[in-house]
Image (tube, rainbow, N blue to C red):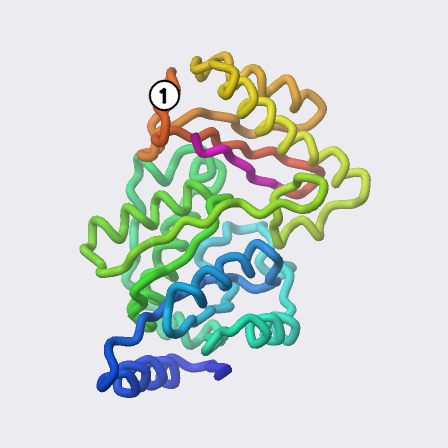
Amino acid sequence: MKVISTTDELIAFRSALDSTHSCIGIARIGLVPTMGALHKGHLSLITRSTKENTHTIVSIFVNPTQFLPNEDLSTYPRQLESDLRLCEENGVSAVFAPHINEMYQSQNEVKILAPSTMAYILEGFARPGHFDGVLQIVLKLFCLTRPHNAYFGQKDAQQLLIIKQMVQNLFLPITINPCPIVRDDDGLALSSRNIYLSPQERHLALALPKAINAIQKAYQNGETSCEILVQIGLEQLQHIQVEYLQACNHSLESITTIIPNQSLFLLCARIGKTRLLDNLWI
């Protein structure tokens, strides 16, 4: 496995992959963008990519442009050595772990603006400009790695849908592959920020998967009213601070009735100082 820290190295590495496979066919490249602190959720993306592609590139970069002032940029968990070990053990071809100056080289950055109808509601309402920063770094990574496939977890549902919209709008020759949420043994969706939770807060956080499970069970029993399903979820969330629980279609428009394979419930709650996300795709 090659560890790459500069954009020049990455461009050369990516070009070499095309040259190496020119006689036996085109190399299939998979990209797994991460901010590090890898867990089983990330590993599920890596495993899928290594199965479906000739080479997998994992990026590890805590992207400053997607953090708002007073968010946890300086304290976001960083554990590069163990992350590199996990990547090598799981068949990754290269890890791109750049310094901030490699990704943002001047003050004259071209800004990528996420669609306002998708990016300034729900998570984007609480974190205005967040998705602009996400698209900015993701597009840079796409340009540098030129992947055939990119892998994103469904836990960050709004982010996933906005990235798919960018790929569609810019005619990028990349397939975005959504990967299911991976949960811990107690049902909590895996997240690098879970380490912020105290034992008591961790117990309270289990209300999120309980709400998701309650909505899913009610839907499976025949309930299709989004208003009723949201109320069923909120009944499980009475003891924590809920920021939103909303039913949407895949354009992030609010819906009143479930449309199979086109609907999802997005949930965000604050436990202590930690914001946690969960969702249900129907």
Q: Is residue 186 left or right of residue 94?
A: right
Residue in the image at 34% along x and 53% along y: 176
Q: For numbered disc 1, what is the local secondary structure? A: loop
Identify the main secondary structure in magenta. Answer: strand
Q: Is residue 195 left or right of residue 164?
A: right
Of 206 and 270, nearer the camera is: 206
Image location (x, y in percent) of residue 133: 40, 55
Q: Is residue 132 magenta?
A: no
In the depicted structure, whether residue 82 falls above or below residue 197: below
Q: Is residue 146 left or right of residue 184?
A: left
Image location (x, y in percent) of residue 270: 64, 35
Q: Quadrant of residue 8?
A: bottom left
In what quadrant of the picture does the C terminus appear? top left
Q: Which residues are magenta?
A: 275-282
Residue in the image at 72% along x and 40% along y: 186
Residue in the image at 53% along x and 62% along y: 35
Q: Residues within 10 Å of mark 1 (few under 14, many from 20)?
A: some
In the depicted structure, whether residue 246 falls above or below residue 143: above
Residue marked by disc 1: 255
Q: Is residue 98 visible?
A: no
> In the orientation shown, which residue stands out farthest toward the left?
171
Residue in the image at 57% along x and 58% along y: 73
Badge count: 1
Image location (x, y in percent) of residue 80: 61, 73
Q: Is residue 122 visible?
A: yes
Of 144 and 130, nearer the camera is: 144
Amino acid tagged 1: Ile
